[in-house]
Amino acid sequence: MTPRMLLALSLAACTHDGGPTGDDTDGGAPPATWSGGVHPLLVEACRGCHQGSVPMALSGDPATDYDTVLPYTDTGDPEGSTLYEAATGLAHATVFPVGSAEAEVLRSWMAAGARED
């Protein structure tokens, strides 16, 4: 299965009609997962620039990249996290517009505890 197919599957699972709630464990759609949503998304969209010795360098290995990305997350304030702000253009070149399905993948994963699966 290609990264785009994995992303499409994870995005379909992450959409809900009530907008971001900050609590994705209330019976709505399940939050995004690291391996099935967040990691493939970051590798595909961010690794082109984030490799080598730059901040948040991604290797492509899920376990290594999880350890790299975790310090940039904030489970108590996903929209205020460095990862979300950088990815949505609030503190970086826009990769995923605020409100996009991709931004929701990041937000829902952090809101659910940013766990590695």
Image (tube, grey):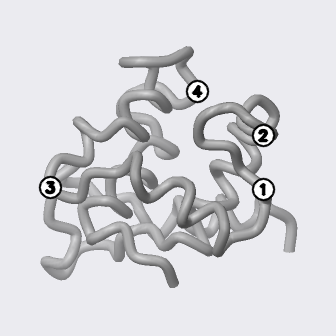
Residue 91 pos. (x, y %): 40, 18
* Mark 2 crowdedness (10 Å alpha carbons): few <14, some 14-19, many ≥20: some
Name the residue type under label 4: Val
Q: How many marks?
A: 4
Q: CA distance from mark 2 to mark 3?
A: 28 Å
**Residue for point 62% across, 68% down:** 9
Mark 4 to mark 1 CA distance (whole Å): 19 Å
Q: Which residue is mark 4?
A: 95
* Mark sitting earlier along the chain (4/1): 1
Q: Is residue 23 above or below residue 95?
A: below
The residue at the point 78 percent across, 40 percent down is 51
Q: CA distance from mark 3 to mark 4?
A: 22 Å
Q: Quadrant of the N terminus?
A: bottom right
At 65% from the left and 52% from the top, the residue drawn is: 41
Q: Is residue 97 left or right of residue 55?
A: left
- Disc ID at residue 51: 2
Question: Which marked residue is nearer to the observer: mark 4 or mark 1?
Answer: 1
**What residue would you read off at disc 1?**
59
